Image (cartoon, helix red, strand yellow):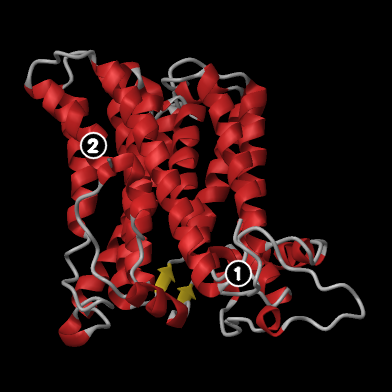
Amino acid sequence: MPLLAYREKHILSAQQLRKLSEHKYSCFSASLLDPLLQPWWNWLVAQTPLWLAPNLITIVGLILNVVTTLILICYSPNGVEAPPRWTCVLCALGLFIYQSLDSIDGKQARRTNTSSPLGELFDHGCDSISTVFVALSACISCQLGHYPNWLFFQCFCAIALFYCAHWQTYVSGTMRFGRIDVTEAQFSIIAIHLVSAVLGPEIWLTKIPIVGLSWNYTILIFITFGYTLNIINFLKMFTEGGSGKNGSSVAGTSVLSPSIPLTLVVLPALMIAQKSPQNIFTEHASVYILAFGMVAAKVTNKLVIAHMTKSEMEYLDWSLLGPSLLFLNQYFNCIVPEIWLLWFTLMWGTQDLLRYCSQVCLEICQHLRIDLFRIPYTPKGQAPHPATASVSSQSNIGSSADKNGGTAHRKSKSKPH
């Protein structure tokens, strides 16, 4: 049974766990905003208690981000209805808190001497989920539901580009951030929410004098420009080649191999949305984005694991069951109401993602003998246990790692949570 698959066998092999233990985080960032925000992040981490585990910081930020976005979605599920202004304030606050906490988890890990590969994986896993909710909240806040095709384009571009960032890392071995990248995008979205909160979401539908375009079209132009810059940086990967043998990926596989899982998510999403006789995307935009977003998050996490363990990525996955059923249902003239299958896709994809991530974290915790959400505390006057004192430290991680990975926890004999 698929539901029992994770309990019946290990997801990670012994070789993958060994490679994971040897993994070193490598990152290069040319971000414009990161240097300006360093003083704020340094002050914030200085106020953080030493007993607070880095991964706990990350997950708290993610939960706040998800909850505030869900509140916004409840008031405007299709991005057509104008949400209350206070929901936009909540989204701006939730994203700012998530961004700040996500930026200090690596600092907290080094501050407490608890860095390990699990933290990097956990950080990227949370980011893969956050990307879906952040993109959707921005589209709702600026009323893109009036232009369904643009709504689809913006959300799936954000999801695909996040995947491509890790695709590039899988090929080169180094995560790279351009001048206009994730931090700039997050603060741009915070600004969108604040404008909606102050002037009302309806402001985005008003026409610009002389130009004649609505304000949300202006936002689309700037966001698309940012996407284009990221795509150009991504395409450079194919001219430079991979870090593996003969220009291959870190796992020795083709640099094009990660394109297959991404295609299996995005292409069915586009076809189902365009061919739906019940206008499933237009009528249920938020559910649609979240459903396929959870599937995309699952394949992105598998790509991150493939990179960190230097292993080949599997193409087929159980999370694709929902999209497959939607596609087959359309082929047989929708013998089942599409909305039923869409909700099934969302629920199945969500539980599959959570079960997968939980099992992977459990296996890594057991292998590294560390806790996920706790830093073992040694009372004063007692010497720390040798197993607790030994740490997989990554002291060479730079400031970009503070924001994008490299957190984890102290080794101990305690059972993982």
Q: Residue at coordinates 22% horizontally, 59% vertically from top-left?
A: 314
| Residue 227 in sight from this viewpoint | no
| Residue 72 in sight from this viewpoint | yes
Asked whether the beta carbons under mark 1 and mark 2 sit within 8 Å of each other, the answer is no
Q: Position of residue 274 (x, y in %)?
A: 17, 26
Q: What element carries label 1?
A: loop
Residue ID for mark 2: 321
Q: Position of residue 395 (x, y in %)?
A: 61, 84
The answer to whether residue 285 is above or below residue 94 is above
- For the N terminus, the quadrant is top left
Q: Residue at coordinates 48% horizontally, 77% vertically from top-left?
A: 25
The answer to whether residue 260 is above or below residue 25 is above
| Left or right: 157 as drawn, with respect to 54 | left
Q: Residue at coordinates 50% horizontally, 59% vertically from top-left?
A: 362
Q: Position of residue 159 (x, y in %)?
A: 36, 47
| Res 373 → quadrant | bottom right
Q: Closer to the camera, 256 or 235?
A: 256
Kindly report the distance in space between the C-alpha atoms of the residues bearing marks 1 and 2.
34 Å
- Type of the residue with mark 1: Ile
Q: What element carries label 2?
A: helix
| Left or right: 183 as drawn, with respect to 105 | left
Q: Residue at coordinates 55% horizontally, 23% vertically from top-left?
A: 201
* For marks 1 and 2 on the same chain, the one whose residue lies earlier in the sequence: 2
Q: Where is residue 224 in the image (x, y as percent from the top left)?
A: 35, 46
Residue ID for mark 1: 370
| Structural crowding at the residue carrying mark 1, measured as other residues with C-alpha within 10 Å and reported as few (<14), some (14–19) or many (≥20) | many
